[in-house]
Image: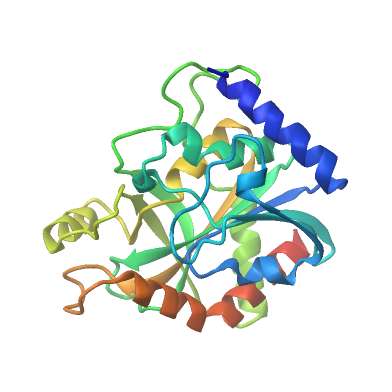
Amino acid sequence: MKGYFKKISEAKYYLKNNIKIMPTIGLILGSGLGILADEIEKPIVLDYEHIPNFPISTVEGHAGQLVVGGFMGKQVMALKGRLHYYEGYTMNQVTFPVRVMANLGIGQIIVTSAAGGINKSFVPGDLMIIRDHINFGFNNPLIGANYNSLGVRFPDMSRVYSRGLIILAKKVAKKYNIDVKEGVYVFLTGPAYETPAEIKMLGILGADAVGMSTVPEIMAAVHSGAEILGISCITNMAAGISDKPLNHDEVIEVAKSVEEKFSAYIKGIIENI
């Protein structure tokens, strides 16, 4: 079996030979948020299935494409669709694209996601800057053999989210009159939505929003030395906060309803990085 680092290297060299440019910013686009990748200039589009060792996204709303090109005066690499632990992938597979990004020299990664609102002051359609997170997936992408070329054995997680990028994101929101929240994101594995009792527990623990992604990728990115900004779109209120039944169609629908606002916000952030 190929070693993990060798798999990363094979994907890295395939991309270097096919994209011919050097992106400096990475974008991970969550459910229904792939529209941003459609605005990349002179895009080079590669299906995940054609990239060596890349897992394939199986979830509706995730195109499973890597898009590279110009965006707001910067060179970016966008993942149009992510991998989830609940799809049956290992944590190493879920975080594989992030590892490849970091090994290509991408030093700043903006991670977006859809999330359920736990904080009762939130409403569907809100955008939340992730201040911190709670890993409630009972797994960790850093378990196993450590490759020193990828990162240190015991990485510090006291400042996961870049304070500089959070300040920038707040300034951009104020400049464009976009109301943004700030809070703690909690990761659960899914794919079932949480019960009202679980949401009540998570709220007591300090979570403002809950989702089934983001945290594994961010942990791998921090381990790789990247600077991170996380933004979640609150697509629904979590179980027990609202009596409305939860379904994935609603997640996609709400994400699409805020595409314009969300797109303008990310554009402003990238333009000012």
Q: Could you tell me residue 270's position as x and y percent?
A: 72, 63
User: Residue lying farthest left?
Assistant: 197
Q: Considering depth in this image, is 99 or 62 the residue closer to the camera?
A: 62
- Left or right of residue 191, residue 102 in this image: right
Residue 226 vs 201, above or below: the answer is: above
Quadrant in the picture for the C terminus:
bottom right
Question: What is the x, y in percent for residue 106?
Answer: 73, 42
State the residue at coordinates (47%, 65%).
31
Residue 47 left/right relative to 70: left
Task: Tell me which corner region of the image, top left, top right, bottom left or bottom right, holds residue 208.
Answer: bottom left
Q: Quadrant of residue 247?
A: bottom left
**On the picture, is 118 further left or further right than 223?**
left
Q: Is residue 222 visible?
A: yes
- Residue 221: x %, y % from top left: 57, 39
Q: Residue at x 69, y 34 (%)?
A: 11
Q: For this rendering, which residue is in front, 271 or 263?
A: 263
The answer to whether residue 159 is visible is no
In the rendering, at what x and y percent does residue 87 appear? 38, 47
Q: Nearer the viewer, residue 159 or 236?
A: 236
